[in-house]
Image (cartoon, rainbow, N blue to C red):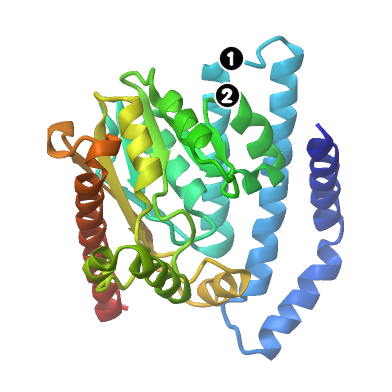
């Protein structure tokens, strides 16, 4: 409650200030872009998106409040509808303000459920893009594994906690309760449900990749050697993925990768990315039957980890091919 008493007023005040101060920030941002030779005006575009984001977030908080007042604070269909609206409006705002289009390939991979989705993590927008792909295109209901730091976003905080998601404490000294929570999260998934996790645990970049491989090498040199050719993704962390599979023995696995948000893991990277004519973001999914996936029990974790590593190396290669194709046509 204390967190929301800070975050919600800050959101509303921010939305009002960004709107009222358009006559101030617009010419200043425009001048800054022109003086730096940024013909696509990335500062102006990002500030325009910030205005749209702030009002979409504010609207989401208001609707969530109304649902609570009328006694529908735990009505899942209403909140999934609100999540679908939120993701579609923000993706639309990205397209209008920054020229970023999102193309979802093979959305039928998630139907019918239950499924668990293992997705690449490369940018600050991954949760939004995946929610858009899952809710709007695949028309199924996601249950997310997200880091608890995202609770600073008031709309994610309120709606995300009313829906069956788990906000992971990455600093927990005992991982057993967290893994047990992931198993429970997907235990009752139905034909319209998908459990979603980003097995890399954080946004990928070369420095994090080198650090992760060095850490793995100190524990499991064979695994580090196996993953040493990886160029775009981070080594996957198998514990959370395995917990989701243990939680629902019937769920098929869907693997997802995307290209188009490379370098969007920091504000500076986003500014540079928006400053170039953006190619469409491709979000690609592929389904694997559960019979193709090793059991994820503790006794079989070595086999499961090797399988997950092979899938991640395949995704890394697919991302590399997609980026090479963009370079040739871009």
- The secondary element bearing badge 2 is classed as helix
Q: Residue at x 19, y 50 (%)?
A: 307
The image shows residue 75 at horizontal and vertical percentages of 58, 14
Residue count near mark 1 (Cα–Cα under 10 Å), binned few <14, some 14–19, many ≥20: few
- Circle 1 is placed at which residue position? 75
Task: Give the numbered dot on residue 79.
Answer: 2
Q: Count the marks: how many?
A: 2
Secondary structure at badge 1 equals: loop
In the current view of this chain or complex, which residue is farthest to the top? Answer: 71
**What is the number of the mark on residue 291?**
none
* Left or right of residue 167, residue 287 in this image: left
Kindly indicate whether the residue at mark 2 contacts the one at mark 1 (C-beta within 8 angstroms).
Answer: yes
Q: CA distance from mark 1 to mark 2?
A: 7 Å
User: Image point 66% across, 50% down: which residue?
Assistant: 53
Residue 108 appears in the rendering: no
Q: Quadrant of the C terminus?
A: bottom left
Question: Visible in this render: residue 256?
Answer: yes
Task: Say which residue appears at 42% left-offset and 49% top-offset.
Answer: 198
23 to 142, vertically: above or below: below
The spot of residue 3 in percent (x, y) is 79, 39
From the viewer's perspective, tell me whether residue 64 is left or right of residue 147: right
* Dot 2 crowding, Cα within 10 Å, few <14, some 14–19, many 20+: many
Q: Nearer the viewer, residue 282 or 257?
A: 257
Can you give x and y, in whole percent of width and height, for residue 187 in the image?
Answer: 38, 21
Decide: is 311 above or below 298: below
């Amino acid at each position: 409650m204390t967190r929301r008493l800070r975050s919600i007023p800050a959101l509303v005040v921010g939305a009002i200030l960004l709107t009222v101060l358009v006559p101030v920030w617009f010419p200043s941002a425009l001048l800054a872009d022109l003086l730096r030779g940024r013909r696509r005006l990335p500062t102006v575009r990002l500030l325009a998106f910030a205005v749209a984001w702030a009002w979409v977030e504010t609207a989401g908080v208001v609707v969530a409040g109304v649902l609570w007042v009328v006694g529908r604070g735990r009505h899942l269909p209403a909140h999934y509808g609100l999540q679908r609206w939120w993701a579609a409006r923000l993706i639309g705002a990205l397209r209008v303000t920054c020229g970023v289009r999102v193309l979802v390939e093979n959305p039928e991979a998630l139907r019918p459920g239950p499924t668990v989705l293992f997705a690449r993590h490369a940018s600050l927008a991954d949760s939004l893009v995946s929610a858009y792909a899952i809710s709007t295109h695949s028309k199924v209901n996601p249950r997310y594994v997200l880091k608890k730091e995202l609770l600073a976003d008031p709309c994610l905080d309120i709606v995300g906690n009313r829906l069956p998601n788990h906000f992971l404490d990455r600093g927990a000294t005992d991982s057993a309760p967290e893994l047990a929570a992931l198993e429970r999260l997907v235990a009752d998934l139905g034909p319209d449900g998908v459990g979603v996790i980003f097995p890399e645990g954080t946004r990928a970049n070369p420095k994090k990749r080198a650090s992760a491989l060095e850490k793995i090498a100190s524990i499991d040199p064979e695994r580090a050697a196996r993953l040493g050719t990886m160029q775009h993704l981070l080594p996957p962390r198998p514990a959370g993925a395995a917990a989701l599979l243990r939680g629902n023995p019937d769920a098929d696995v869907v693997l997802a990768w995307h290209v188009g948000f490379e370098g969007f893991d920091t504000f500076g990277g986003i500014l540079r990315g928006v400053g170039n004519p953006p190619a469409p973001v491709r979000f690609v999914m592929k389904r694997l039957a559960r019979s193709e996936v090793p059991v994820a029990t503790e006794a079989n974790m070595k086999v499961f980890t090797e399988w997950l590593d092979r899938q991640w190396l395949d995704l890394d290669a697919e991302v590399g091919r997609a980026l090479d194709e963009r370079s040739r046509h871009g």
